[in-house]
Structures are given as structure tokens and as C-alpha cells.
Image (spheres, grey):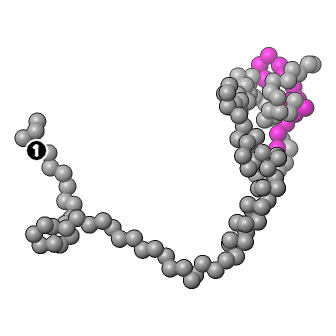
Amino acid sequence: MTVIRYLYRGVLPDRDIINATDTEVSFRYTDSETQQKKIKTLPVLTFLWQILQHVIPKGFRRVRDYGLLHGGARKKLKKIQLCLMMAGKLDFSIIEPIVRKKAQCLCRQCQQPMQFMGIVRSSAFG
């Protein structure tokens, strides 16, 4: 049996496809909860649908290829992680939290806070 590569570095390595017929595909996978290798057999269309869920649309790139997750940014990422770890050890209890007041609409006559009671639809406009 010949298995054609369907994705470059896809979700499921080619070696994990055990058997493929006209109607079913059997493959090996690792259960995320138990970390045990299991074998699953699916109808061809269901298998293809699940694989195609992981194909990136044309023009898009995997996020881990850019920014801090890029392989060449390891040193920078380690520095940032170290800074964040150190920031977690600082004592921020000396800084008083900012208490924000709610905006209030005051009555023009009595200067007391007004309360929202609801919306009334007027027949004058429509």
C-alpha cells in the first residue's frame, strides 16, 4: 500500500496512518488525557474533514513562525520570561490601588444624583 503525503508537517505524521481503503482510514494517535497511543478508524470523508480543519488558508502563516514564538527569538523570549518572573516577586502592596468613581448625572435643581428609570417611546416623533 502506498500512502501519499497529504500535508507538509501536518497534524498526523504519515507513519501514523496504518491503513487506508476506499471507505475507511485507520490511524494511530495519542490520547491527550491519558497520553496513551490509540488506533481510530474513520470513514474517509470524516477523516479528511478533520485533517482539513488544520490547513491554514492561502496567504496566512502559522503564528509560531513570527514574533516571540519564532525559533530565532528564544533569547528574547527567555529574557521576557525572566523579567516577568522577577516582577512577580516584587512587593506591590505599597502602591495604593486606584479607586474609580462612577460617573453621575446630577439634577440641575437639587444637585442630587439622578437614577435611570427606563426609556419611554414618544409618539411625537413617529
Q: Mark 1 points at which residue?
A: 122
Side (left or right) of 11 relative to 102: right
Q: Nearer the viewer, residue 13 or 126?
A: 126
Side (left or right) of 18 relative to 110: right
Side (left or right) of 57 relative to 98: right
Query: Please, which residue is most extreme toward the bottom here?
Result: 94
Q: Main secondary structure of the magenta part?
A: strand
The residue shown at (80%, 32%) is 10
Residue type at the position of mark 1: Ser
Picture layout, residue 77 above or below residue 10: below
* Mark 1 neighbour class, 10 Å CA radius: few under 14, some 14 to 19, many 20 or more: few
The residue shown at (68%, 72%) is 88
In the rendered structure, which segment of residues is drawn in magenta? 15-31
- Is residue 26 among the parts visible in the rendering? no
Q: Is residue 17 magenta?
A: yes
The residue shown at (15%, 49%) is 120
Q: In which quarter of the image is the N terminus?
A: top right
Q: In which quarter of the image is the C terminus?
A: top left
Query: Please, which residue is most extreme toward the left here?
Result: 124
